[in-house]
Amino acid sequence: MPDRPSISKRAARRLIQQAFVLTGRDRPVRQHIREAHVTTVWMLEDWNFEWTITLDRGKVRFDRRPARVPDMTLTWPNAADFFDTIEQGRAPDDSLTMEGNLTFRNFIDLVYRSFCRSLQRVIQYPVDDAGDPLM
């Protein structure tokens, strides 16, 4: 959307956090991760922007601080490309790198797909549950 201004870091953090709230409400995701206990760090490198997602027995927990010892790290080199790809309705797989214990990938993949769908909706309709604007 060329008429839309670029997303600020503050707005991005709020959009990402809301997308993970919606991901945590996704029943298939909760059922799939009910046995999991995984800590992941997600990072947009060019913004030096990191957050922690913990999967804990069916719950998705968001933390603004990066975990010290994550099980996996998901990294995208360019934030603008990440958000552009999400807005187009695609998961930004091309630039994604995953490091760490890849045995947890089956848990992370479902959460990642749900997160991408949720983030696309949140970018299109940037309001929280109370109707307050996120951007």
Image: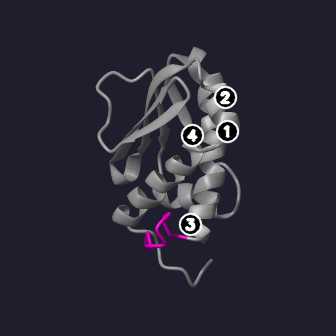
Q: Which residue is mark 3?
A: 123
Front: mark 3 or 2: 2
Label 2: element kind: helix
**Dots 2 and 1: beta carbons under 8 Å?**
yes
Tell me the crowding category of disc 2: few under 14, some 14 to 19, or many 20 or more residues within 10 angstroms, Cα based. Answer: few
Q: Which residue is mark 1?
A: 27
Label 4: element kind: loop
Looking at numbered disc 3 in the image, what kind of residue is underneath it?
Answer: Ile
Magenta residue span: 126-135
Looking at numbered disc 2 in the image, what kind of residue is underneath it?
Answer: Gln
Whole-angstrom CA distance, mark 4 to mark 3, is 20 Å
Q: Which residue is mark 2?
A: 31
Sequence-wise, which precedes: disc 2 or disc 4? 2
**Dots 1 and 4: beta carbons under 8 Å?**
no
Label 1: element kind: helix
Q: Is residue 37 above or below residue 94?
A: above
Whole-angstrom CA distance, mark 1 to mark 4, is 25 Å
Q: Which residue is mark 4?
A: 96
Work out whether residue 75 or residue 21 is closer to the camera in this orientation and state it.
21
Sequence-wise, which precedes: disc 3 or disc 1? 1
Q: Residue at x 39, y 24 (%)?
A: 70
Front: mark 1 or 4: 1
Q: What percent of the width, then of the height, locates residue 101?
A: 51, 16
Q: In which quadrant will I find the C terminus?
A: bottom left
Whole-angstrom CA distance, mark 3 to mark 1, is 22 Å
